[in-house]
Amino acid sequence: MSGINEANIILGICGGIAAYKSPYIVRGLKERGADVRVVFSPNAHKFVTKTTLQAVSGHPVRDNLWDENAEASMGHIELAKWANMILIAPATANSISKIANGAADDLLTTLLLATEAPVFVTPSMNQRMYLHPSTQSNLVKLRDLGYFTIGPSDGSQACGDEGPGRMTEPNEIIDHIARHCSTEIPQNLEGVNVMVTAGPTRERLDPVRYITNDSSGKQGLAIANAAKSKGATVTLIAGPNVEPTNPGIFRIDVESAIEMNNAVQERLKETDLFIGVAAVADYRPANFLKEKIKRHGNNSLTNLELTENPDVIANVAKVKNRPIIVGFAAETNDPLKHAREKRIRKGIDAIIVNDVSDPSIGFNSTENAATLIHEGGEIAFAKQSKISLGAELIDQLENIFSLSKRQKSLRQTSHA
């Protein structure tokens, strides 16, 4: 993607451990052609040095609202006017709170009040801090103000905790910025309704246990964002722990396969393209026990009985005047063979398959490689970030199925 080329980007760095990744962000943005200037929050220097950021950016690092040399010419205003984008990575809980509530007590927060450029915020903090109601409320405020959020990711953290709050990886952040910067994205999907499922499902055993899988929802989210960027009206049906969504996407959160199936069916009538990316559990416990299952006794886990879940994609295929249907297949052996068979068996238009036996792609990774299989042929996509793969997949689906406003009108007429 060449959208970053010639962009003027301010990278705001806050005082969090993920600041050690910031030089990689600067280098990646510059490799795409951007001019990057770095602004520190008051505590950023405790985690990464000015020397490092000056070396990779080619510009002195700014961190002082009271720099007499810079402020003699109202430097913070000039810097705000210079930027056509501001990226804050990492954004700590404290900085998010300040930004959401309009504080202007340092150079970085003052710049945000003085700029008309789009602002991207990448949260990074302990999972308990991220999930705290105050932080969640502040993130809602940011989105209401028109700011964009990137991530966070879910996983192990520097403090030893596990959960949401990890800063999105630099290559993913850069892909987000590239998609936004690009002025070459045609709005060919304007007027097309796209529904995407993403993430895992949870099938409850008892109040404290459930059956699930390792799906993160990253690929589904990337596909939803790519469709939105081309003008589509997008509905995302999200399983547990799927990352926050672009405010322009209508999101429905579900937990179980039954909930996901019901949510899809309720909103299917107006859908033109259905993309089932979610890793839906094939089975669920036959009986949900209201009390915790004990190690021993008649209700022990050794006596667990399962029953089959609804097949979300197959159920979409049964609907009269159904939309175009694209499924996903996560395979560990003979992926192409199994995916070809699955497409025919389910009666769907296309299927996208990846080999999840490779730990560097698929579940819980930031990268993916896949093959798109449809009636007219197969298209292989090399290993790349899930964000860029999502964009390539939407481009190909648009071409294969003529997904444009004109074609949508023709389909509606033929169904009348």
Image: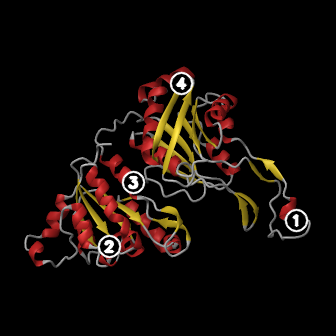
Q: CA distance from mark 1 to mark 2?
A: 54 Å
- Tell me which label, 4 or 3, sits earlier in the chain: 3
**Residue at label 4?**
377
SS at badge 4: strand
In the rendered structure, which amino acid carries the disc numbered 3?
A: Asn
Q: Position of residue 252 (x, y in %)?
A: 56, 52
Q: CA distance from mark 1 to mark 3?
A: 48 Å
**Residue at label 3?**
171
Q: Position of residue 391 (x, y in %)?
A: 43, 41
Q: Position of residue 296 (x, y in %)?
A: 88, 70
Q: Is residue 410 left or right of residue 177?
A: right
- Tell me which label, 1 or 2, sits earlier in the chain: 2
| Dots 1, 4 in contact, CB < 8 A | no
Residue 205 image-quadrant placement: bottom right
The circle drawn on residue 48 is 2
**Residue at label 1?**
299
Image quadrant for the N terminus?
A: top left
- Tell me which label, 1 or 4, sits earlier in the chain: 1
The circle drawn on residue 353 is none
Residue 191 vertical placement versus 170 (above, below): above
SS at badge 3: helix
